[in-house]
């Protein structure tokens, strides 16, 4: 494992998830260390989304143990996971297209100002802070009042990652963050992932394309049909095609 003797940030043992007669996950064991980028790989239907939904509190496992910072957790909602520092950026975008950039940045955590017995959204504070942070992550915008639907896919991903880091995410889960992005946008998002790691975040990068995650991940966990195929350290892999071959064959001779 990559924890080098320290306590893992995430420990999951014997994780199973059943949806009626369907076994989406069967006895999955994983460990995620502090401040590492892990690629969670597998074809469609491998169980990647089910696993991250358990980690992020969308639903509990049917069976198994889930520890976060050494403490057993039983999240019943994503809000509970977010309160522990777990943020998820979904592939379909975590932003609301019909709302402004500033409102999206503070969605669910809007600052308010009081006037007598009433509280109102502090639009001035939202505009100022969102402009500052978004400029720092390299996204150019004319006004924080502009709607998100004018932004490119890469800019939306950058803002979603920047928002998660602004709120101090300890664990950042990225679900297919490079999907449908241009090569230039992919490089920009990868730079933001490296920056998030440099700020102390631990990152789980979910994808079916090993070439997307290979530039930034130090370790790769592979799933197939709800089971863990194994894990590989980047230093033990000569080429990303070696990882792709394990997924294609559905087996590996040894796991690490």
Image (cartoon, rainbow, N blue to C red):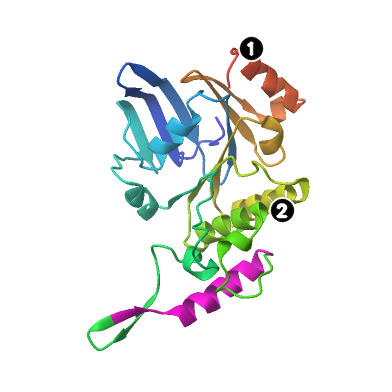
Magenta stretch containing residue 137, yes or no?
yes
Residue 20 shown left or right of residue 105 in the figure? left
Magenta part of the chain: 119-138
Specify the quadrant of the image occupied by residue 209.
Answer: top right
Q: Is residue 171 left or right of residue 234?
A: left
Please name the residue that numbered disc 1 is placed on. Answer: 249
Element under label 1?
A: helix
Q: Secondary structure at mark 2?
A: helix
| Residue at 65% from the left image edge and 43% from the top image edge | 178
- Residue 185, image x, y percentages: 72, 51
Give the quadrant of the N terminus: top right
- In the rendered structure, which disc, 2 or 1, sits on the residue that comes first in sequence? 2
Does residue 27 sit above or below 34 in this rendering? Answer: above
CB under 8 Å between discs 2 and 1: no
| Whole-percent x, y for residue 137 in the image | 65, 64
Tag shown at residue 188: 2
Please state the horizontal and vertical placement of residue 10, each as a whole percent of the image.
44, 38
The kind of secondary structure the magenta stretch mainly shows is: helix
Q: Nearer the viewer, residue 60 or 11?
A: 60
Q: Residue visible at 38% across and 36% down?
A: 54
Distance between mark 2 and mark 1 Cα atoms: 32 Å
Q: Which numbered circle lies on residue 10?
A: none
């Amino acid at each position: 494992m990559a924890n080098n003797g320290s306590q893992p940030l995430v420990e999951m043992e014997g994780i199973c998830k059943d949806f009626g007669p369907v076994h989406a996950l069967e006895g999955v064991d994983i460990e995620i260390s502090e401040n590492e980028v892990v690629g969670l790989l597998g074809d469609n239907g491998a169980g990647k989304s089910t696993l991250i939904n358990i980690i992020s509190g969308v639903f509990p496992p049917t069976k198994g143990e889930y520890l976060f910072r050494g403490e057993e957790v039983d999240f019943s909602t994503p809000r509970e996971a977010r309160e522990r520092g777990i943020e998820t950026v979904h592939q379909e975008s975590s932003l609301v297209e019909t709302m402004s950039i500033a409102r999206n940045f503070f969605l669910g955590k809007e600052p308010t100002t009081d006037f007598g017995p009433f509280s109102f959204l502090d639009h001035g504070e939202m505009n100022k802070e969102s402009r500052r942070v978004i400029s720092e992550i390299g996204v150019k915008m004319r006004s924080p009042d502009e709607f998100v639907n004018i932004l490119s896919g890469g800019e939306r991903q950058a803002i979603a990652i920047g928002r998660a880091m602004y709120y101090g995410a300890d664990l950042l889960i990225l679900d297919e963050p490079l999907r449908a992005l241009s090569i230039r946008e992919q490089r920009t998002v990868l730079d933001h992932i490296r920056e998030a790691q440099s700020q102390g975040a631990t990152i789980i990068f979910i994808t079916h394309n090993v070439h997307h995650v290979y530039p930034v991940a130090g370790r790769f966990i592979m799933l197939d049909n709800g089971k863990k195929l194994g894990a590989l350290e980047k230093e033990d892999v000569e080429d990303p095609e070696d990882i792709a071959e394990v997924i294609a064959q559905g087996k590996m001779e040894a796991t690490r």
